[in-house]
Image (cartoon, rainbow, N blue to C red):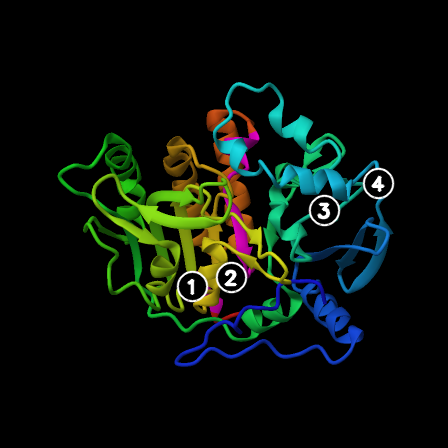
Amino acid sequence: MLTDRAIPAPGWQITSKPLPGLEKIEDAADIARGVSQEGISVVLLGTDTEQRLTRIDWVDGHESVTKEASDVFSVSDYRDWTSEFPFRYGIDEKTVNLFYNTTDRLRVTDMPDGPVVVVADAELQQLPSNIIRIGDDFAGQKRPMASAPSLSWLKAARANPPATNGRMVAWISQEDRLGETFVAIAARISEALEKHGIGLDTGPVIPRNLAESELVIVTAHGGLGLDGRFFQRVSDEGRLVTTGRELAASLRNVGVVVLFVCSGGRADKVPDAVTTTGLAKAILDQGCSAVVASPWPLDSVVTYQWLPTFLANWMTGMTLIEANFLANQHVAKALGAEPAKALAMHVYGDPLRLHRSKSKEVG
């Protein structure tokens, strides 16, 4: 009841439709039970009236409830954390053990093994699932992790995935005044794109034919507001400056959107409302199945280390959550286990999304 339900049911065509209502608490349990029998565990996170984190794990249709002690997960510490993080993880390269020190009281005592989708209340959705602490480890180091806005949305996404046209495209804007970063990324990912039949669009404006594609990969700069919160703009290294909403609107009913966009996976709670805002959320609002993005500023070297492994696995039948996990594992081996790089790419939305040639087998 505390999750983000201010989001349309996925796969809408002309007019967005609200998610089906939950008539009783048992409805949510039924959804979690059903999803947990599809080869993925469901972890629900919320805070109670005593400001303690409550965790409900659903594994293979079975439920367990845990109330975390305040010295394990401190709600007040978490609220302080949101004033600087996760943004600072992508820009602070000098502070030693930054991830570990700042998440010391953002732990859970345990979490199911294997793939896990986290459905958290709207406030807690600001904490990326990959970096939830379990002891001295981060969840995303040991198991595939994903986040979904609500159980109702997840059920609808599994039942009604977007009917895509199978097209796959990458967009990296190139202009005469283009800087070196995007040139390097385009050169280094071109082989992987060609291998998997993914077209590369280098036009200086958002392509008009992205809607209903099976896969869209976007490389751009992302910008937050002056207070370091709330995703606001998308730009290239030339003259293009637009809003996240405009980019999202161009991605109607895309199967999977990969964002090489700084803070593209960031979520901020809307003040005085039980909902979140951000670029990934805006894309899910447009009927898409899933977004893979970083919640903090993304180091450009991650893009060409992560993408070939991700494509090799997702295109050959792995679920989205598993393909992302293996790609992150490759980044850790290639660049070191620093979470800012090795845990940057997160899955938001339907974690079990398969490439279209395989997706007819599910849902």
Q: Looking at this view, is 39 or 104 the one in front? A: 104
Distance between mark 3 and mark 2 Cα atoms: 20 Å
Q: Looking at this view, is 164 or 266 the one in front? A: 266
Distance between mark 2 and mark 4 Cα atoms: 36 Å
Mark 4 touching mark 1, by CB under 8 A?
no
The structure residue drawn at horizontal position 74% and vertical position 81%, both measured from the top left corner, is 23
Amino acid beneath label 2: Arg
Mark 3 touching mark 2, by CB under 8 A?
no
Magenta residue span: 339-359
Q: Nearer the viewer, mark 2 or mark 1?
A: 1
Which is more N-terminal, label 3 or label 1?
3
The residue where tag 3 is placed is 113
Amino acid beneath label 4: Ser
Residue 362 visible? The answer is no
Q: Nearer the viewer, mark 4 or mark 3?
A: 4
The structure residue drawn at horizontal position 78% and vertical position 41%, both measured from the top left corner, is 73
Distance between mark 1 and mark 3 Cα atoms: 27 Å
SS label for mark 3 = loop
Q: Is residue 310 left or right of residue 67?
A: left
Residue 70 - label: 4
Residue 353 - label: 2
Distance between mark 2 and mark 1 Cα atoms: 8 Å
Which is more N-terminal, label 3 or label 4?
4
Give the percent coordinates (x, y) of residue 88. 53, 32
